[in-house]
Image (spheres, rainbow, N blue to C red):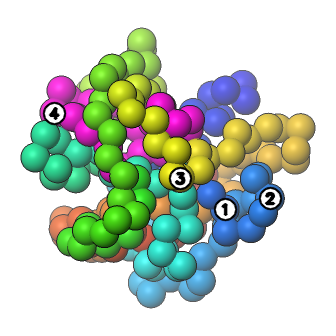
């Protein structure tokens, strides 16, 4: 049961995707969003949010990219050579990942790339319903500069109750049918 709750929570995080404190299990709470975030009815996408502050404070946040470096999905670094993402992001176009991005349009020495060598989709993933929409990406080069997301342990008091708020981050759209954000965003959304 905990595995399913963890998978659900991380899948939601990947749709938009460490703490700014020293506690590895603390879920950071962002400042008041600049616009009201919402989940589009009938669609699991999250819209809106506020810029991640300070930049790169979500050290596990990953950009999944095609061979030209074009960002098309987010993910979470869960180990130096493993990224968790949504299965619908694994269409065969995924080629590399990049960590340490705050603003997509600017490059700097803090960004780290790694090539994807293997993709593992959930065995019961359904492309039509998006059931079990979770996948792992194995990386050729370990990402050692950034910290993977901490494992969530139910014995630490974490529980995932429907309707409870959680924080997600990524480069999602800033308006319905809009373009992806150039800057990493963070927002609180209810667990579904």
Per the image, label 4 sits on a secondary structure element best described as loop
Which residue bears the numbered disc 1?
Answer: 19
Q: CA distance from mark 2 to mark 4?
A: 36 Å
**Dots 4 and 3: beta carbons under 8 Å?**
no
Residue wearing tag 3: 146
Q: Position of residue 108 (x, y in %)?
A: 31, 69
* Mark with earlier residue (4, 3): 4
**Residue 128: image tag:** none
87 within the magenta span: yes
Q: What is the spatial separation of the Cα atoms under label 3 and label 2, in whole angstroms?
A: 16 Å
Q: CA distance from mark 4 to mark 3?
A: 24 Å
Observer-side mark, 1 or 3, equals 3
Residue 45 in the image: state x and y as whole percent: 36, 54
Which residues are drawn in magenta? 74-98
Residue at 30% in and 23% down? 117
Whole-Å distance between the Cαs marked 1 and 2? 7 Å
Confirm or deny contact between disc 1 and disc 2 (CB under 8 A): yes
Instruction: Report the residue that reaches farthest toward the left.
Output: 68
């Amino acid at each position: 049961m905990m595995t399913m709750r963890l998978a659900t929570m991380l899948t939601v995080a990947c749709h938009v995707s460490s703490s700014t404190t020293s506690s590895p299990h603390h879920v950071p709470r962002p400042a008041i969003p600049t616009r009201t975030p919402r989940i589009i009815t009938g669609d699991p996408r999250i819209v809106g949010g506020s810029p991640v502050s300070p930049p790169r404070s979500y050290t596990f946040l990953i950009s999944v990219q095609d061979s030209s470096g074009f960002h098309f999905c987010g993910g979470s670094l869960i180990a130096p050579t493993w990224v968790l993402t949504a299965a619908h992001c694994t269409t065969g176009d995924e080629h590399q990942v990049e960590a340490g991005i705050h603003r997509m349009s600017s490059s700097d020495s803090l960004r780290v790339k790694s090539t994807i060598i293997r993709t593992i989709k959930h065995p019961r993933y359904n492309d039509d319903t998006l059931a079990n929409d979770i996948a792992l990406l194995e990386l050729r080069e370990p990402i050692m500069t950034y910290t993977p997301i901490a494992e969530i342990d139910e014995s630490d008091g974490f529980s995932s109750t429907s309707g409870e708020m959680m924080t997600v981050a990524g480069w999602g759209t800033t308006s319905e049918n809009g373009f992806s954000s150039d800057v990493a965003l963070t927002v609180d959304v209810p667990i579904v």
